[in-house]
């Protein structure tokens, strides 16, 4: 390809969408690096402190789309202090100052202010897409700025954010000339909604394909919205706890029947059984169903609904479906590729008959041969079940199993679950993400290090015996990018055994382990390319830095280390010490 003109090579590169592949081709030669650098329009940054915006802009002058992640993954489990950081404002300031032609911004676990959204809305004339996932710090005033000023906005997707709702009028800020919307999701908003403004916006958006409303949108308004947008492909509905009268029910069903393109359905935070039946006519076309917030849909109503969904490829659901419900899924949804089963109550009693077990998992694996991704919260598991699942579904690329009771063994033999997870990693050659739980010894990590050659992310909780367990993983999993460990007996020996390993990893999280302050300080001295952060909300950081003799005995509460090319961050709060 070196004989082709640069313009031809750049055109070929345009067909390469994978961030990993783009990174790889940039390393082939200096000429390819230059072409790739100047032509890349989409950039993914998994840690906002791994690089600064100035270096990003210098490297990729044609940037149009940016995906940025902030807080560590364990923030989802309240293990990261609220004030830890992850501020997007410096990024937007730098992008605006450099006059980058930004069109798309996707943020996850970031702190976003109204000031940031105001600046964003006024700085990028061609801005089209804003996706915020698990973000915080902003209000509906910021959303009003985006609505009013981003004249070419096609997508506004707000997923599981903490948003202060000042008033329900932000939807009224979309100008009458705004007709380009293809996706609108405000399901996480808790306040009132300006229904008239929403209906006008939907009515003048002929290309709208995805609409997810919050619980404040009543049933009659949903009917009118569907009548305005029968072209919808993705629908998220609100809360409908009261039975509709006959006339309202007929109108709703008629509107739903006209949505022949609908393929994805979610929502139902509260729903009366009769409302649910109105959606039966479109179930046969659904490929995605998310009922992970539908705690009110249980028993026969839930099972009957799923029986109509024979083409599902993706299903998110609560464990209240029970093993019998999962058996129905297995016999009905032969095209299923992704399944997530969430706990309906994290403090459930162990004898609750509705919680799922190994029986449901085995049934799914036997009935859904195309399954390649699973997240499964359950109350018990066995080695025999995991071995069977491994045989039935060798194509898993994501396997995340969470037994709600820590350190719980195989409930039939009282043995560790080493052999079961060992079977998973041996059979599933393409496994990239794995979460393990239950009673586990170092042996399971030996299996993981030996067989999980493609593994990129591993989450460990309440597992292992000695430092050897962690060493097996670090030495064996050559493609590991993220390792998350909590409440496990791994200490300094494992942390410091091969510092160079962290050159190829994005991050390591360890909380409530056996790592000491002295070990962390040695790591920071030996690996200047790392940011080594100690998180301790009850510690005096000045005293922590001055200690010497006590360092080897002082265990750290939480350690977060990550690769960076710009050194220590400047916005660390008092509870974070950067060594």
Image (cartoon, rainbow, N blue to C red):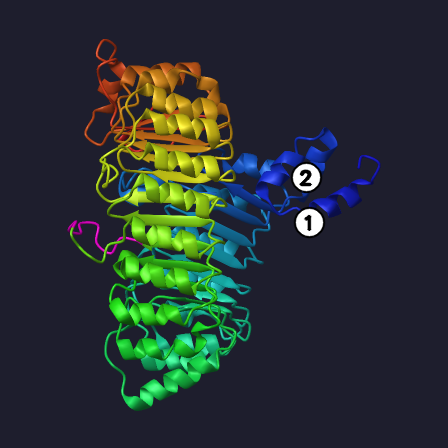
Q: Which residue is mark 1?
A: 15
Q: Quadrant of the N terminus?
A: top right
The x, y position of residue 267, in whole percent, is 35, 66
Queried whether the magenta region covers residue 347, the answer comes back as yes
Q: Position of residue 533 (x, y in %)?
A: 34, 27
Image point 38% across, 28% down: which residue?
A: 445
Dot 1 alpha-carbon crowd within 10 angstroms: few under 14, some 14 to 19, many 20 or more: few
395 with respect to 17 (left or right): left
Question: Residue visible at 49% across and 60% down?
Answer: 335
Judging depth in this view, the residue of 140 and 440 nearest the camera is 440
| Residue 36: image tag | 2
Q: CA distance from mark 1 to mark 2?
A: 12 Å
Q: Main secondary structure of the magenta part?
A: loop
Quarter of the C terminus within the rendering: top left
Q: Is residue 19 visible?
A: yes
Say what secondary structure mark 2 lies in: helix
Q: Please, which residue is most extreme toward the top here?
A: 549
Q: Which residue occupies the foreground of this view, 15 or 277?
A: 277
Image vertical order of residue 79 relative to residue 374, above or below: above
Label 1 element class: loop
As displayed, is residue 318 above or below residue 219? above
Q: Quadrant of residue 304?
A: bottom left
Q: Nearer the viewer, residue 412 or 14?
A: 412
N-terminal label among 1 and 2: 1
Q: Quadrant of residue 190?
A: bottom left
Magenta region: 342-350
**Residue found 29% across the figure and 61% down from its top:** 324
């Amino acid at each position: 390809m070196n004989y082709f003109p640069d313009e031809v090579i750049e055109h070929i590169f345009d067909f390469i969408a994978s961030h990993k592949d783009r990174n790889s081709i940039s390393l082939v030669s200096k000429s390819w690096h230059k072409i790739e650098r100047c032509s890349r329009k989409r950039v993914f940054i998994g840690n906002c402190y791994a690089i600064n915006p100035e270096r990003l802009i210098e490297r990729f002058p044609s940037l149009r789309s940016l995906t940025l992640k902030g807080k560590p993954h364990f923030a989802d489990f309240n293990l990261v202090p609220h004030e830890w950081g992850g501020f997007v404002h410096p990024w937007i300031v730098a992008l605006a100052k450099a006059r980058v032609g930004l069109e798309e911004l996707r943020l996850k676990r970031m702190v976003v202010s109204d000031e940031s959204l105001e600046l964003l809305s006024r700085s990028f004339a061609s801005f089209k897409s804003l996706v915020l996932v698990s973000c915080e710090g902003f209000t509906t005033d910021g959303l009003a700025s985006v609505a009013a000023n981003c004249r070419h906005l096609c997508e506004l997707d707000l997923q599981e954010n903490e948003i202060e709702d000042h008033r329900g009028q932000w939807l009224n800020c979309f100008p009458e000339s705004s007709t380009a919307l293809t996706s609108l999701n405000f399901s996480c908003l808790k306040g009132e909604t300006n229904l008239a403004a929403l209906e006008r916006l939907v009515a003048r958006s002929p290309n709208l394909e995805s609409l997810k409303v919050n619980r404040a949108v009543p049933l009659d308004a949903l009917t009118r919205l569907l009548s305005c947008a029968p072209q919808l492909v993705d629908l998220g509905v609100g809360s409908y706890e009261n039975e509709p009268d006959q006339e309202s029910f007929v109108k709703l069903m008629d509107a739903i029947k006209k949505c022949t393109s609908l393929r994805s359905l979610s929502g139902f935070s509260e729903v009366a059984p009769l409302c649910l039946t109105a959606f039966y006519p479109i179930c046969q076309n659904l490929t995605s169903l998310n009922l992970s917030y539908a705690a009110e849909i249980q028993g026969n109503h839930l099972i009957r609904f799923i029986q109509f969904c024979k083409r599902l490829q993706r299903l998110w659901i609560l464990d209240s479906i029970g093993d019998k419900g999962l058996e129905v899924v297995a016999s009905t949804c032969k095209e299923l590729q992704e399944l997530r089963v969430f706990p309906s109550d994290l403090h459930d009693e162990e004898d609750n008959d509705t919680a799922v077990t190994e029986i449901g998992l085995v049934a799914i694996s036997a009935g859904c041969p195309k399954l390649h991704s699973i997240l499964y919260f359950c109350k018990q598991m066995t080695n025999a079940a995991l071995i069977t699942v491994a045989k039935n579904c060798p194509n898993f690329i994501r396997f995340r199993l969470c037994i709600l009771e820590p350190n719980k063994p195989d409930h039939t033999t009282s043995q560790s679950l080493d052999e079961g997870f060992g079977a998973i990693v041996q059979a599933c050659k393409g496994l990239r993400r794995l979460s393990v739980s239950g009673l586990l010894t170092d042996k399971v990590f030996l299996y993981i290090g030996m067989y999980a050659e493609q593994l990129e992310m591993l989450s460990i909780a309440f597992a292992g015996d000695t430092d050897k367990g962690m060493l097996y993983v670090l030495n064996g999993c050559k493609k590991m990018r993220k390792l998350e460990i909590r409440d496990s007996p791994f200490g300094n020996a494992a942390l410091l055994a091969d510092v160079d390993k962290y050159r190829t990893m994005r991050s390591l999280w360890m909380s409530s382990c056996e790592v000491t302050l002295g070990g962390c300080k040695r790591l920071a001295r030996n690996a200047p390319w790392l940011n080594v952060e100690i998180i301790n909300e009850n510690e005096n950081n000045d005293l922590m830095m001055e200690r010497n003799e006590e360092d080897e005995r002082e265990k750290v509460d939480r350690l977060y280390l990550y690769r960076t090319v710009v050194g220590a961050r400047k916005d660390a709060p008092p509870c974070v010490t950067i060594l």
